[in-house]
Image: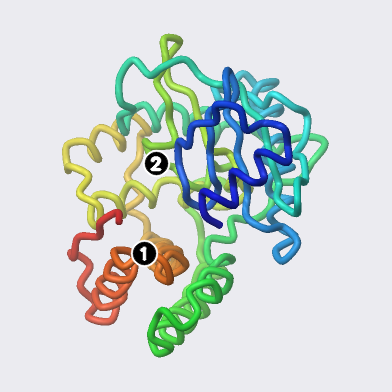
């Protein structure tokens, strides 16, 4: 999906007037007056995407009822517009400062204290579930050997993850716990991007920042502030390397879907795969 297609969906939904593109990734995200509109990818070919959009709205309603600061849905469900799920959200006030890792940690402690929701079921965190779809979207733009390598890694880490013994009690998790998914407004930090909410190992949420420290340039001091605020460092857990390897595999495959139209994405995909093949855990990964 590109911006042009997303704007066509917006127009069909009657939401195109003055729409400002905020982000284009797994979804296209637009600001429209006092709303934020998320346009998902084609749910005809990938029916699970509509289910995910519906669940994200349900999660927002559940968090509101549970007193967890998070973005609030503006409609009670997802629209299906020309085969694409479309969700509407109340626009947050402008940020007063960038989110810090410790902001994320405080919000995670609230989420990790929650029991399972009533009225709907959170799925397992299928971290590797999108790998095949992303590689399929990459098509001939990537080396088939690299695609095969990632599929082999996916299968190996999926098996290893299923055998993990957690340190923390399993339950609701955010699923993509990064500071970029926290917005700090006048009322304090709130969680955003709720579509990966799951019920699984709480360690999934903590490995994300550990990987950010090693791969994405998060300062050691910032990581230490995160672990101090949360109260535990996931790197002390024997299963950390398994969840880290699964997330690295998924991150590589996610980049691959952009390779057909973005030369920088293709170059970054090749760098990431090479670092995995070489077993070099210190190679820095970059956005594109």
Q: Position of residue 33 (x, y in %)?
A: 57, 19
Q: In this view, does 169 lie to the left or right of 180?
A: right
Q: How crowded is mark 1: few (under 14 residues within 10 Å), some or many (20 or more)?
A: some
* Colour convention: rainbow
Q: Which of marks 1 and 2 is in front?
A: 1
Dot 2: element: loop
Among numbered discs 1 and 2, the one appearing first in the sequence: 2
Identify residue for label 1.
262
Q: Does 157 appear above or below 288?
A: below
Q: Does 142 appear above or below 220?
A: below
Q: Position of residue 52 (x, y in %)?
A: 69, 49
Residue at far top of view:
186
Q: Which of 245 and 70 is in front in this view?
A: 70
- The residue shown at (35%, 34%) is 231
Task: Say which quarter of the image contains residue 89.
Answer: top right
Q: Which mark is residue 53?
A: none
- The residue shown at (50%, 79%) is 139
Identify residue for label 2.
178
- The residue shown at (72%, 57%) is 43
């Amino acid at each position: 999906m590109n911006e042009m297609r997303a704007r066509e969906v917006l127009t069909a939904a009657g939401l195109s007037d003055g729409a400002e593109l905020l982000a284009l990734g797994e979804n296209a995200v637009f600001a429209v007056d006092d709303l934020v509109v998320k346009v998902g990818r084609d749910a005809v070919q990938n029916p699970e995407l509509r289910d995910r959009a519906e669940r994200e709205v349900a999660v927002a309603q559940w968090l509101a009822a549970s007193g967890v600061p998070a973005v609030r849905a503006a409609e009670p469900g997802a629209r299906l517009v020309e085969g694409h799920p479309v969700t509407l959200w109340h626009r947050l006030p402008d940020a007063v400062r960038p989110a810090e890792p410790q902001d994320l940690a405080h919000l995670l402690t609230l989420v990790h204290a929650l029991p399972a929701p009533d009225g709907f079921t959170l799925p397992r965190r299928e971290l590797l579930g999108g790998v095949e779809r992303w590689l399929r979207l990459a098509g001939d733009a990537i080396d088939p050997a690299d695609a095969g390598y990632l599929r082999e890694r996916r299968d190996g880490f999926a098996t290893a993850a299923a055998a993990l013994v957690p340190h923390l009690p399993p339950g609701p998790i955010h699923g993509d716990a990064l500071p970029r998914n926290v917005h700090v407004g006048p009322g304090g930090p709130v969680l955003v991007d709720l579509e990966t909410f799951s019920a699984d190992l709480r360690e999934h949420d903590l490995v994300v920042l550990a990987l950010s420290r090693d791969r994405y340039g998060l300062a050691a001091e910032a990581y230490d502030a995160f672990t101090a605020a949360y109260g535990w460092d996931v790197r002390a857990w024997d299963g950390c390397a398994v969840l880290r390897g699964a997330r690295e595999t998924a991150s590589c495959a996610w980049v691959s879907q952009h390779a057909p139209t973005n030369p920088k994405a293709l170059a970054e995909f090749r760098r990431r795969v090479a670092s995995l093949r070489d077993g070099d855990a210190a190679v820095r990964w970059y956005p594109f």
